[in-house]
Amino acid sequence: MSTTKGTQILTLHGLRFDANLGILDFEKTAPQPIQVDAELNLGTQDLLPRDDDILHVLDYRKVRKIIIDECNAEHVNLLESLIGKVAHRLMQLPGVLGVRVKIAKLEIFDDCEVAIRMETGQW
């Protein structure tokens, strides 16, 4: 008996861009660099898709755009608020059973990055 199905996880790692985020004075006047990592649990999928058509899978370009758009929609004071907005939006995509998101502030301290990771849905 051959295996015909598997669990599919869509991953974006190391997505870097500037976002308006933070409570400090310098954070309120200019965007700062962040890095977003995301995993989307798409559940059990056929090992071989029914065809080779992008319309029948979750397009990772859409996932990337949603993350960037959510992070740039408005200034957010807290990293916790921002990551919640991103996770909630990604969970609304068709076929997504679970979401793991990590957002890191890359330049808030000289000696480390600060990050929050959130997991929701099924894993």
Image (cartoon, rainbow, N blue to C red):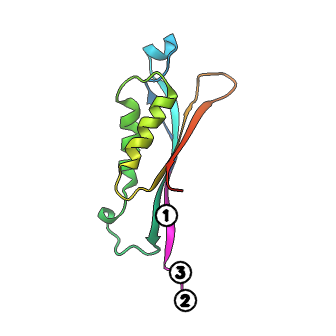
Q: Secondary structure at mark 2?
A: loop
Q: Quadrant of the N terminus?
A: bottom right
For badge 3, the amino acid type reads: Thr
Instruction: Identify the residue shown where x is 51% and y is 39%.
Output: 36
Please report whichever mark, 3 or 1, sits nearer to the chain's N-terminal start.
Answer: 3
Residue 80 percent location from the top left of the image = 51, 30
Q: Which residue occupies the extreme bottom position in the image?
A: 1
- Report the predominant secondary structure element of the magenta stretch: strand
Instruction: Identify the residue shown where x is 35% and y is 71%.
Output: 52
Residue at mark 2: 1
Using the rendered view, name the quadrant where residue 46 is placed.
bottom left
Q: Which residues are magenta?
A: 1-11
- The 10 Å Cα crowd at callout 2, few under 14, some 14 to 19, many 20 or more, is few
Q: Which residue occupies the extreme right position in the image?
A: 111
Residue at mark 3: 3
Q: Is residue 46 visible?
A: yes
Residue at mark 1: 8
Q: Is residue 14 visible?
A: no
